[in-house]
Image (cartoon, helix red, strand yellow):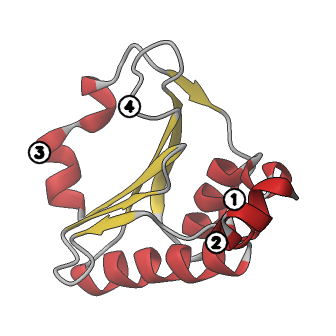
Amino acid sequence: MLRASINPSLSRMATSLPSVSAREGAQRRAAQLCLDMKANDVVLLDLKGVTDMTDYFVIASGTSDTHVRSIGEHVVSEMKKAGLAVHHTEGLQQGRWVLLDFFDFVVHIFHPTLRSFYQIERLWSDAETVALEP
């Protein structure tokens, strides 16, 4: 409480951060949200020990630009409801390759042609694939 009396904004900052329980399993929740929107080939890669950039990648494909956008928007809105706001987004307007950065994990949603071109799973082949429930 001493810190809050010195700087009142500190107490507001502490309450705006997601709880540890909200962050646990959040990458699985994001993958499930992709599946809920009928995303194809959803993969969860565990990057711990491979890179310090992030802990997980969620990789999914849509069937069209519109589908890719709608999957991305769904993940952003549902994760926000769960207390996890996306830190940074890329490509949401175009719908070819949507990147959603949640710090601990990054969601990549691809148009099928771009996914096969970039082969991101091959680039990160040192990472362990985490099994997802259907």
What residue is shown with label 1?
29
Amino acid type at circle 3 is Phe
Judged by depth in the image, the label closer to the viewer, 4 or 1, is 4
Label 2: which secondary element: helix
Residue 68, quarter of picture = bottom left
Q: Residues within 10 Å of mark 3 (few under 14, many from 20)?
A: few
Q: Nearer the viewer, mark 2 or mark 4?
A: 2
Residue 112, given in percent of the width and then of the height, sits at 24, 60
Q: Nearer the viewer, residue 19 or 50?
A: 19
Q: Secondary structure at mark 4?
A: loop
Do the residues bearing badges 2 and 4 touch, measured as CB atoms within 8 Å? no
- Please state which amino acid type lies under the numbered disc 2: Ser
Label 2 and label 4: CA atoms lie apart by: 29 Å
Q: Which residue is mark 2?
A: 9
Residues at marks 2 and 3 touching, judged by CB atoms closer than 8 Å: no
Depth check, front residue: 117 or 88:
88
The structure residue drawn at horizontal position 45% and vertical position 35%, both measured from the top left corner, is: 54
- Where 70 sits versus 114, above or below? below
Asked whether the viewer can see residue 80, the reply is yes
Badge 4 crowding class, 10 Å Cα cut-off, few under 14, some 14 to 19, many 20 or more, is: few
Residue 20 located left or right of residue 63: right
Number of marks drawn: 4
The residue where tag 3 is placed is 117
**The residue tagged with tag 1: helix, strand or loop?**
helix
Contact, CB < 8 Å: mark 4 with mark 3?
no
> Which residue is pictured at 21% across the width and 84% down the height?
93
Specify whether 131 is left or right of 15.
left
Q: Quadrant of residue 107?
A: bottom left
Instruction: Please tell me how crowded label 2 is: few (under 14), some (14-19), or many (20+) other residues with Cα within 10 Å.
Output: few
- The answer to whether the residues at label 1 and label 2 have Cβ atoms under 8 Å apart is no
Residue at mark 4: 53
